[in-house]
Amino acid sequence: MTTCFYNTLSRKKENFNTIEPGVVRMYTCGPTVYNYAHIGNFRAYLFEDLLRRYLKFKGYRVIQVMNITDIDDKIIRDSQKTGKPILEFTKPYVEAFFQDLDSLGIERAEHYPAATAHIPEMVELVKKLLAKGIAYRTEDGSIYFKVSEFPKYGQLACLNVKEMVRGNRVASDEYEKEEIRDFALWKGWKPEDGDVFWETEIGKGRPGWHIECSAMSSKYLGTHFDVHTGGVDNIFPHHENEIAQSEAASGEKFVNFWLHCEHLLVDGEKMSKSLGNFIFLRQMLEKGVDPTAIRLTLLSTHYRQKLNFTEEKLDMSAKMITRLRDFKKSLNNDLTDGVEQLSTIVTDARQNFESALDDDLNISEALAVIFTLMHEVNNFRRESSLSQADAKQIEQFLATIDDILNIFSSKSESLTEEEKALLNQRTAARKNRDWKESDRLRMLLSEKGIVVEDTRKGAIWKRKLST
């Protein structure tokens, strides 16, 4: 099957090929660590996790780089409010970010370069641009990229530069799409920067945001690599500026495939400080919300569509996961030694699942394939028992799915020592035909989120997912 992705650069789906056969070099825009990451950030990181896992499933070796932006205007502003040096200020947010990745089952990238650890690489890149006459110095010691010297500027964001408002330069890292300005590569030191500066060959100061990613991506992936991902808000100016400074310096194409994730909405509204609807992942986890339900909610809408995050959608995801886990558990009930009878159903499901994700990670269609398989297997079991051979091939398919989606296994699938003791007490009560005590223990377990069902082979349990 041919895998295709929607390339923001061409505005169309393209068959996916890599520069080096069998290897994907991928750069993903990581967190700016002036605060904890919110669920909008993790929507993008989970899309990238799905992409990474699926590329590995397709047989590629993935070399992924995700930057840690630990120096920018916001970090300087907020660190000075607290009176802490920037590395001390950002440290707890960096640590929290990795804890959150683990909570959501996001695979670790191969490299997590921090901007403050790569100043020499940024300086060298700025020197190249100065030598080529594509960058210039200003009286305050800053260095800017000369947009007029890069004719392809605007190709990613589909901007007609000639029709845009032309300004001279902009010192901040972010600006309006309607304005095309020379942007800062290096920011000369100002008194308000305090002790945040580096003494370098190009002067005393600090890097601009955009130069950080160009320098770090080229160090770990080369000056021309396969995939660059991020949120749609990164397209302009950040990714547009990355292309300009990288291609101007190297003289070759920067990235082949640009994949961008749409915004996350909360109850139909874009997250914003003015609306006060920012939701931090850590807040949800502290309330006991199951991280796997959050993971599925953030994955279940196609990455190029806006995702409306609601309590109802979170609850629906929790119920979906419960159904999937119950189905998987049930496969070993009442098996026979008969021959395979469901191989065609499983083979079709495997092909349809892969075909869906081959089509620009069509996650909705992929999830539909799983539930169709469950429906067909359950219909079969109403008329006949499942053979051990059939159960094995279904389990193998579910394992393949979980390598990509990572929603079957969870810490919630294990019991605490207290919960185990209560289950054992209930088993003893039933053995002694003490139904009143048995019911009391069932209710106690239910209050702890453990649902107990009695079957011919004994009691089975499952944990209710919290939302």
Image (tube, rainbow, N blue to C red):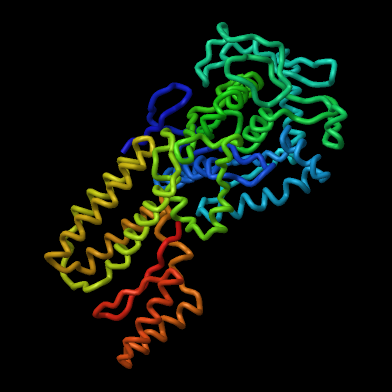
Q: Is residue 190 above or below residue 395?
A: above
In the rendered image, the residue lying farthest to the left is: 383
Give the side of residue 91 with respect to residue 378, left or right: right
201 versus 371 height, above or below: above
- Work out whether residue 404 can be spotted: no
Viewer-proximal residue, 145 or 131? 145
Which residue is at the far top? 162
User: Which image quadrant: the N terminus?
Assistant: top left
Residue at image x 37%, y 89%? Answer: 428
Q: Nearer the viewer, residue 291 or 6?
A: 291
x, y percent for residue 140? 84, 19
Residue 10, by quadrant, is top left
For the question of whether residue 172 can be seen, the reply is yes
Q: Quadrant of residue 319?
A: bottom left
Q: Position of residue 3 (x, y in %)?
A: 36, 36
258 left or right of 323 in image: right
- Note whether 343 is above or below 73 in the view shown: below
> Quick one: quadrant of the C terminus?
bottom left
Q: Looking at the image, which is closer to me, 463 or 29?
A: 463
- In the rendered image, residue 16, in percent from the top left (x then y), is placed at 41, 32
Residue drawn at (28%, 64%) of the image:
392
Estimate the x, y position of residue 363 in percent, counting from the top left. 36, 42
